[in-house]
Image (cartoon, grey):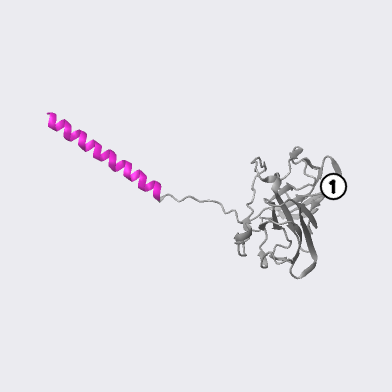
Amino acid sequence: MENRNKSIIFALLIVALLITSTGFAAAKESTIVVKSADTPANRVAIFSAFSPEKIEIHSGESVTWINFKKPKAPVVLASADELWKETTLGYGKAFSFTFENPGTYSFTLKDNPDIKGTVTVLAGESQNENSEKSVGTTVTAEKAQVQSKPESSVKVIETTNKENVTREEKIAIYSTTLTPSLLEIEKGSTVSWVNYKKPKGSSVLVSEDGLWEKQTINYGKAFSYTFENSGTYTFSLEGVPEAKTTVVVR
């Protein structure tokens, strides 16, 4: 009788092991689908004004406002059409909103209502672009890197704190301008050039002081460079002579 009980217990253990191993195998075969983050959202940079002031999207697309105001200070972003409650953005923080209905919507800064911008939402599905990989060689000797800027698909205030936010600056690339045109930073600070060019296309960033070889930056992508030495440096867009910016490193 005892031997029979042992046999039954042993058989149950074998069955349990088979069920467990089958579950592990199924888990390993499961496909995890991750939404691509290579398609950038439309972005509006907040400096002393909105840049760009007017933006055109399709219904279902998001717009993200990012506070780059100098001197560094929070701003209160307001929707003239009351699409969202007044939202306070600290320096380097962003707010995203998804527009579902066609129309033209206005936004402003509560503390400076003369600063205004508009979002024109066109009917129809958003135009999905093929994912583009960043183009350009990483300048590792000077801590330069190519970074992708993920899309925010829902209304959200980014709350992730970055310890080095005060040492990171951004320069926006548009069709014929680099904004801001003058930037003063401390040694060891990193500057990122972000391509917001419309119509969406690539731009070639040139260091006129030979800090790096020409960098091709696709729409929504960024090129970053850390300045270790004091001095005044000039940058431009290839083929767009009027698009220049100067970085003064103290």
**Foreground of the two, 17 or 60:** 17
Q: Quadrant of residue 244?
A: bottom right
| Residue appearing at x 13%, y 32% in the figure | 3
Q: Is residue 34 above or below residue 13?
A: below
Asked whether residue 156 is drawn in magenta, I would say no
| Residue appearing at x 72%, y 53% in the figure | 170
> On the rendered structure, is 7 left or right of 219?
left
Confirm whether residue 180 shows in the render.
Answer: no
Q: Residue furthest bottom?
A: 239
* Residue 14 percent coordinates (x, y): 24, 40
Q: Which residue is mark 1?
A: 115
Confirm whether residue 243 shows in the render.
Answer: yes
**Foreground of the two, 29 or 59:** 29
Numbered disc 1: secondary structure: strand
Task: Please tell me whether the stretch drawn in magenta is mainly helix, strand or loop.
Answer: helix
**Foreground of the two, 163 or 97:** 163
Q: Is residue 130 above or below residue 12?
A: below
Which amino acid is tagged 1? Ile
Stretch of the chain drawn in magenta: 1-28
| Residue appearing at x 35%, y 43% in the figure | 23
Q: Quadrant of residue 123?
A: bottom right
Q: Quadrant of residue 92?
A: top right
Asked whether residue 20 is drawn in magenta, I would say yes
**Foreground of the two, 48 or 114:** 48
> On the rendered structure, is 78 left or right of 5?
right
Q: Residue furthest front?
A: 230
Q: How many C-alpha atoms fall within 10 Å of the one at disc 1: few (<14), some, or many (≥20)?
A: some
* Residue 175 percent coordinates (x, y): 76, 63
Please give the count of numbered marks on the rendered protein. Answer: 1
